[in-house]
Image (tube, grey):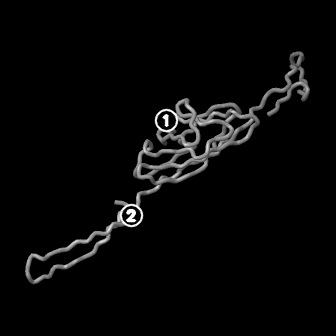
Amino acid sequence: LQGSTSLDTRATAATQSLNTQGSRFTVTSPQKPKPVIATNDELPIAIGSEVAIDQSSLETTDSDNTPSELTYTVTSAPSQGELLLSGSAVGQGGTFTQQEINDGNVKYNHTADPVDDDNFEFEVSDNADQTTSGTFSIDVQAVPTIATNSGLSLTQGNQVPVQTGDLEVTD
């Protein structure tokens, strides 16, 4: 039972000295707990990379459900990359479970240019249709590249300062 349910019951005494009594009882069952987003930490990723979203970054718990019974539904897909479940794209309306996160099967693949951070919105439900929602953030980081490497020549034991024209890194 969920919520409140009323039931009428009548009790009749075994002896004639008691009259039939009518009683009304209200039985209230406890509400099932909602899933709780226990961990939701921003995921760092380099431009053009693919990385697993593991339970150290995203974990939802529920005291009366197992990880395989907690289902994430993507309510707004990432715009700078894509979510993958076992290599297949998961778009808006797509689903995956906490167990699939725990097993390393959920990944984010950065595909966009220029470099912008990303996120996706989700709703997590348990097998009793209790839900909670959140946003998972992805920190897209530029990878430094060597713009100039002209090399240096010097004899053993000498020192030469490295100038910007000799070696330059950009991100």
Q: Quadrant of the N terminus?
A: bottom left
Give the percent coordinates (x, y) of residue 121: 60, 47
List the residue tagged with mark 1: 103
| Residue type beneath disc 2 | Gly
Is residue 6 toward the left or the right of residue 155 in the image? left
Give the percent coordinates (x, y) of residue 23: 24, 76
Query: Residue at the location (17% across, 74% down)?
Result: 11
| Residue type beneath disc 1 | Asp
Residue placed farthest to the bottom in the image? Answer: 17
Q: Compare residues 3 and 98 and report the one nearer the observer.
A: 3
Name above or below for residue 103 compared with residue 17.
Answer: above
Is residue 121 toward the left or the right of residue 165 in the image? left
Q: Secondary structure at mark 1?
A: loop
Mark identifier at residue 3:
2
Is residue 156 toward the left or the right of residue 140 in the image? right
Q: Which quadrant of the structure image shows residue 19? A: bottom left
Query: Residue at the location (91% across, 26% down)?
Result: 165
- Between the C-alphas of marks 1 and 2, the distance is 36 Å
Give the percent coordinates (x, y) of residue 142: 75, 35
Q: Compare residues 170 and 16 and report the one nearer the observer.
A: 16
Between discs 1 and 2, the one toward the N terminus: 2
